[in-house]
Image (spheres, helix red, strand yellow):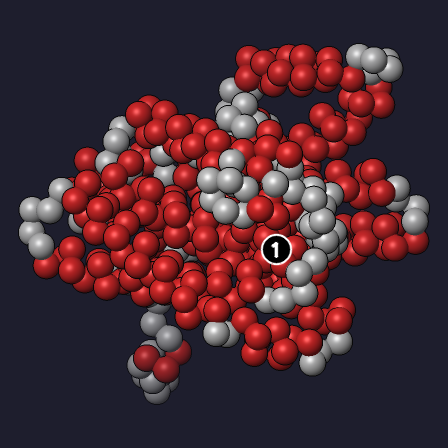
Amino acid sequence: MNTQRSTLIFWLVFLGFLILIQALIGTGLLSNFWATLLKIGAVMSIVSIGLNLIYGFNGQFSLGQWGFYAIGAYTAADITYRWTQLHNASGLVVVLLVVLLVSLAFFLVAKIVSRLRGLDALSAFTLYLIGLLIAAILAVMVGKGLIAPITNILNLLPAEWAIQIVFFLAVILGGCIAAEISYIFGLPVLTLGSDYFGIATLGFTIIVKVLLDNSDTLLGFTEMKGARGMVGIPKLTSWIWVAVFLIAVLVVTRNLLHSSHGRAMISVREDEIAAKAMGINVAQQKTITFVLGSFFAGLAGALYAHVNGFLHPNTFNFIKSFDPMIIVVFGGLGSVSGTVVAAFTWALVLEGLLRLVLPQGFETWRFVVYPLLLLIMMLLRPQGLFGAFEFPYLRQVLPRPFQPRELHQPPSPADEPLNNGA
């Protein structure tokens, strides 16, 4: 009963906070500046929870979260841009087919690889890469014939409904594209040690940024405009949308961590050799965690792309890739609650409060004040703001300890001998 009561209180407080913010935004009592910062805080919560899964719970030091964040942002932005500016569903149809066919290709290649004994990681990566390219080409070819019918179907709906449906699918597909790329990228890279894995993922973030700089020439996406930045993206990310996706990510993360897969994932962080000795597939657990964390990053990037309606490759450079890492360390490694609180604190303090407190012309000093606060935090409380603490709903509920029945129980009245007065 206590657990149910605490969980109910958590959800009432959490949902009450979300409704209160929406009411303040709707009535105009909360300015657009602070409303945007709250959206950014929710977005950073999602991307940081994904990194906490990879680093805090699975023990894989990754600096590639920002690269998958960028992939999700540009994927979703291209889908909604084509719908609002080009008035067709070409981006939605092609990306959807790419996700479906690439997933099918990965499944078939996995069946083939499982039958080839002694195949090294690079050879398996090559087979997966070939399957990905074939599936992508096939998706483009098939998608050309489906663009017009899908566009006509969506045009039958009211315009407001159609754009919201396209936006929702764009966010999901942005996360899926990031997850599939992380899967094929992780095949050879997850075999590396933690430090080398971090360097490899940092290199991935730099590669993504360079590709975005040349997206209009090298990749052929002229609407992205390369290093000039992508404009014309509809501002569709509302507080309700980010709140819904944040709640979904929290529920999925909580249920995963409290499941047998979550315990196996944490055991890999504690000791890979011991986990392998207990029969846990270490490589599989690393892959699942890395893909799920990248999926969350793609979702967050897709939501971010529609906050301000503008994307620039410099937003996704390798220096900015340390932001989720700072949030995870500040909130506490292995603490979902700490990650959420630290993400909102990061957005409201760094981009809001310090901008207002510092004198005019000294706004950039916030990048000095914030690291100093982080340094003091690490000296005084190295386990992070929350440590291992979790809010009631997110906290794991352990079963009651087993209490065996007493061997010698007093006899019941029915078992007593009858007293005949003798």
SS of the residue at dot 1? helix
Residue 388 visible: no
Rendered residue at 18%/42% (across/down): 121
Is 43 above or below relative to 192? below
- Label 1 sits on what residue type? Phe
Q: Is residue 357 left or right of residue 121?
A: right
Quarter holding the N terminus? bottom right
Residue 202 position within the rendered picture, expressed as x and y whole percent measured from the top left = 42, 28
Is 107 above or below relative to 414? above
Quarter holding the C terminus? bottom left
Is 312 above or below relative to 91? above
Res 403 quadrant in image: bottom left
Rendered residue at 16%/60% (across/down): 112
Res 155 quadrant in image: bottom right
Residue tagged 1:
245
Rendered residue at 25%/39% (across/down): 188
Residue 66 position within the rendered picture, expressed as x and y whole percent measured from the top left = 51, 35
Q: Is residue 30 left or right of residue 163?
A: right
Mark 1 packing: few (<14 Cα in 10 Å), some, or many (20+)?
some
Rendered residue at 73%/43% (across/down): 308
> Closer to the camera, 407 or 315?
315
Residue 365 visible: yes
Residue 190 position within the rendered picture, expressed as x and y whole percent measured from the top left = 28, 38
Q: How many marks?
A: 1
Q: Is residue 185 left or right of residue 314?
A: left
Going by the picture, which residue comes out furthest to the left? 117
Going by the picture, which residue comes out furthest to the bottom? 420
> Closer to the camera, 417 or 58?
58
> Closer to the camera, 65 or 87?
87
Residue 317 position within the rendered picture, expressed as x and y whole percent measured from the top left = 54, 28
> Closer to the camera, 311 or 191?
311
